Image (tube, grey):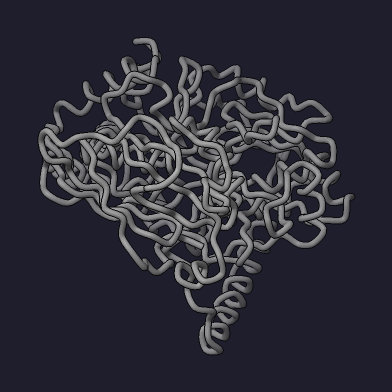
Amino acid sequence: MAPAELPVTGVACLLVDDVEAAAGYYRSVLSFEQVALLGGAQPQFAIMRKHGAAVLLQQSPPGAGRPPAGPGGPPWDAIFLVDDVEGEHHQLKIRGVDSLGEVGGNGIGWDSFDFRDCGGNLICIGQSAGQFLAAVRPAPPGRTDRWRERRQRRVAQREEKRLLREFREFHGRLADKHDVYYMFFTEDLLHWVIKAESFVPADVNLVLVGAGLAADEQRWIAEHMRRPFHHISLPVDDVTVWEFLFAVSGENFGWLDIDCFVLDQGLFTELARVDSRAALNCVWSWDSGYGFRVANTHFMFVNAAAISAVQQRGVAASPGTYDWHGSVRKFPPRKCFMSVPSAGQRALLLEVLPADPEGRPRLLEGDYFNTLVVYQLLARAAGYPVAEIRSLARRCRAPADADSTDPEDWPEDMSDELFHLYGISYYKSHDYEPGIRGLYLAAEYVMLDNTAALLPARYAGQLTSVAAELESVGLRPDAARDRLRRHLTDSRGLGAAAAERVLEPLPAAGPRAVVG
């Protein structure tokens, strides 16, 4: 369940030397949600939330003393109660938390561990007892709430059944279904779509899938792009599109994010050469902590035989998101829901994952299984592991320091072969500190400045709006290109030539698309 839906029963107040830096640490390393930064250009307070509790990070007064250097039991500065102490300890260990104590009784016979945060505060993570769980979890839904949720689920299922039927018809009309790469996007993102598409060779079988696009965007694609294109009439997220692809694709297929620029075009051919015993080929992945890596979806190619192998084990081979409650997905335009693992899926997952205290497969990150994660685990149990054709790290956390040159401070690696900007389609919904927000705005401004004259008139309005936002975070629009260039070369390690390819304008839009 999303943290925002949990009641807050108390607030721990922690002193830190630098509120913005501490908020970044809590976001990126400890996976907290940032609710607010308060106090102006140099925030004096940050409200963070996780585990059903809130934390107020507050600026330490000048000359205030710091606590001793290591963990070691009470007294603590804050306690967080979790369902799975061992699982939380495992997650913090692979995230590189400093001064991490071992799980034990800590002298009071209660499963817990502690660590010092970046401000020297002693934080305890402890096992929830029944009375504590009642305090941090919402009350069970009433009869009206349950009826409303069931109705919303039925509506969502009915809508997506129709959308899948339309997508299946489009897929059936494709002249070439061999080694297709799919690129999915929603409204107001054509400036990223056409830039990413410009790096895809004409002989690569790229199919465009849009959802909830405005009429002028649909017309523009039909008139200016020469790729097969299908429009999904209702807003959907990438999870739904992945579900559609698994439902209709009988052959191997690939995926390319709109903010992923493939600077080495040979990678399209290399990625599509999937070994017969691999679940998929990927370039970005992260450490599960259990002896294998998990692929990210930014640029990958899926082996259809692995999907069949999972199904032959008697379980659904779904690429969707999962949790234990069937929670609402974080997708504001429509009510969409996560899946709950079936008994068969749980049994297969337990072949590759340890059990949590309730006997369920242990979650790998946060409070749910992200897109394609459950499928990868099921495929691994069926004998189809992930194959990495490049070993670019995905660190499963948000960026923290806009000026950092340490690769570990960024959500993922880049190289002179591959550029990917983490979360361009949803960065506006995150409360990033001004430096990080400025980087996103600089990237938006550059892509819009390069393409707005080619796109529907609404994109010129977007350019004006982004320019005003840049000014609000202290960055002049005419400095945005240099700011992004410096980020790519100094912070992300791209060579000068690769950075210029990311930044350069498009020469012109292409000719007519093939529309389904």
Please report the residue visible at 73 percent of the width from the left and 45 percent of the height from the top: 354
Residue 331 x/y as whole percent: 46, 60
User: Which residue is more in the foreground, 11 or 439?
Assistant: 11
Work out whether residue 445 can be spotted: no
Foreground residue, 191 or 172?
Answer: 191
Q: Quadrant of residue 269?
A: top right
Task: Look at 71% across and 50% down and name the residue there.
Answer: 246
Q: Residue furthest bottom?
A: 143
Residue at image position (17%, 41%) is: 60
State the image coordinates of residue 160 (x, y, percent, origin top left). Answer: 61, 66
Q: Is residue 350 left or right of residue 35?
A: right
Q: Quadrant of residue 213?
A: bottom left
Residue 154 percent coordinates (x, y): 62, 77
Q: Is residue 200 above or below residue 166?
A: above
Asked whether residue 310 appears in the rendered view, the answer is: yes
In the image shown, does 120 or 54 lie closer to the viewer?
A: 120
Relative image position of residue 486 (x, y in whole percent): 26, 18
Above or below, comparing residue 371 to residue 11 in the picture:
above
Q: In the drawing, does residue 515 fall left or right of residue 21?
A: right
Above-or-below relation of 169 to 14: below
| Residue furthest front as drawn | 107
Count of numbered badges drawn on the protein: 0
Q: Measuring 68% from the left and 34% from the top, which residue is drawn there?
A: 290
Q: Is residue 133 above or below residue 28?
A: below
Decide which of 240, 447 is in the foreground and name it: 240
